[in-house]
Amino acid sequence: MHPMLAGGVRFARIGTEAVLVLAAIAVLRRADAVADVPFWTFAVVLCLGVLHRSVTTARRLGDLAARGDRAEAAAALAGERLEVLLRDGAEVITTAAATGDVTWVSPSALPVMGYRPAELHGPALGGLVHPDDRQAATDLISRVAAATATVPHSAELRVRHADGTWHWHEVVARNLLADPAVRAVVSHRRDITERRAAEHRIAYSASHDALTGLANGPTLARDLARALTAGTRYQHPVVMLICDLDGFRAVIDTYGRDVGDRLLQIVGGVLRRVTRDTDTAGRLGGDEFGVVLTRVNTVDEALSVARRIIDGVTANATVAGMSLDVGCRVGVALAPPGGSDADTLMRHADAALDRAKRRGRNIAQIYVEEEVTAPWS
C-alpha cells in the first residue's frame, strides 16, 4: 500500500476510536458509574491520547516518506549510471522480436555505429548488413530461433556505418524469448574492423614477399597445386614460368643494394601487368620469379606471355634516371590436364630456365622432354 494511503487509513481509525470513547463516556455518565468525574477531564485525556497517536503516526509517515524518497533517489541514480554505462560501452546491445525486428537499441549505437538508437528499430538494422553477408545474417537468426537461452550463437558481418563505410561487427545473440523478464532475442555486437585489418595484415605478410608485394614461394607453390587440381577437373592445361635477371649481380655491385631492390620492385610491377586475376605471380627468392598461368591453352600462348615479361623488364629497367644493363630469361613448362604434379612442373620450368641461360640473354625456353640414352647403348 502507498504510504500516504496507509496514513489516511490510520487517521480514519483514530477518528473512529475517538468517537467510540466519547460514546462510552456518555453511557458511563448516564449510568452514574463515573458521575463524580468532570466531563472535561475525560475530554482532555481523550485529546491527549488522540494527539499522541497522531504524533506517532506522523512520525511513521515521515519515516516512510523519507524511505520512499531515498529509494526513488537510489533507483534514479542506478538508472542514470546504467544509461552512462550503456552509452559509453564498446558494445551495442539490441533486443528483437521473434521476427528479427529490433525493439530496443542501447545508447552506444551512436558512438559505435553513428546512428541514434531510434533509427535502428524495426527492420532498419538488418538493412545495413552488407549484401554479401545477408545470408550469414539470416542463418544466424535461424540458428538463434531454434536454440535455447543457454546457447549463444555468433557471426562476423559487415555493417554500413553512418559515414557510409563498411565496418566488421562480431554479433553474439541469445534466445531469451521464453524469459518472462525479457521476452526477446538479445544481441551484443562490437566493431572488430581494426582486428580484422590486423589479421589481414598478418596473413598478407605470411603469404607475400615484403619487397615486391608478390606472392612468396610457399604461396606460389600452393596456388600451382590448386591450379593443377582445377585443370584436371575442368580439363585445361596449366603453365609454370620461372624467370630471372641477367646482370642483376653487376647492378648491385655497381649501384648498391637499394638500386637492386628498386629493380626487383619494377620486375614485380611488370609481372602484375602481364598476368591476370586468375594467375599468380610470385618471387621465389633473390632475382628469381615464378608465374602460374591458369588459362593458357597452347605453347604459343605461354611463350607469348614469357615474351611480354622479357620486353617489359628490359623496357623498364631504369632507376633514378639510370638505365640499367639487365636482361631476362624465362623457362616455360606446360602441364596437360592431369599430366603433372606441382613439384614436377616446377622442376621442368627450372630445367627450361637453365637451357635459356645457356642460350643467352632475353630468351624464353619451353621445356621439352629429353631422350635419355644409356651410356652403354
Image: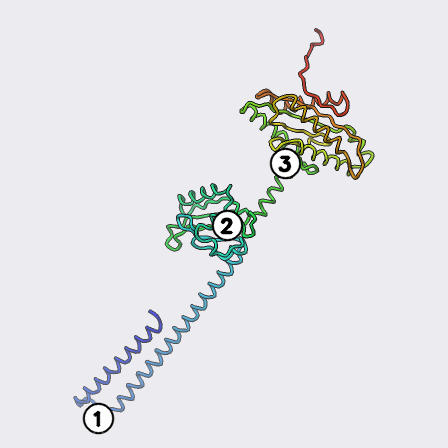
Rendering colour mode: rainbow
Residue 125, how many percent across, how many down?
47, 50
Which amino acid type is shown beneath numbered disc 1?
A: Asp
**Residue at mark 3:** 207
Look at label 2 and name its amino acid. Answer: Arg
Q: What's the residue at 45%, 68% (across, down)? A: 73
Q: Is residue 74 left or right of residue 336?
A: left
Tell which circle, 1 or 3, labels the residue nearer the N-terminal end.
1
Quarter the N terminus occupies: bottom left
2 and 1 marks in contact (CB < 8 Å): no
Q: Amino acid at mark 3?
A: Ser
Compared across the picture, whether 294 is left or right of 45 comes to: right
Picture residue at 51% right of the left edge, 53% below the top:
91
Camera-near label (1 vs 3) is: 3
C-alpha separation, residue under disc 1 versus residue under disc 3: 116 Å
Label 2 and label 1: CA atoms lie apart by 87 Å
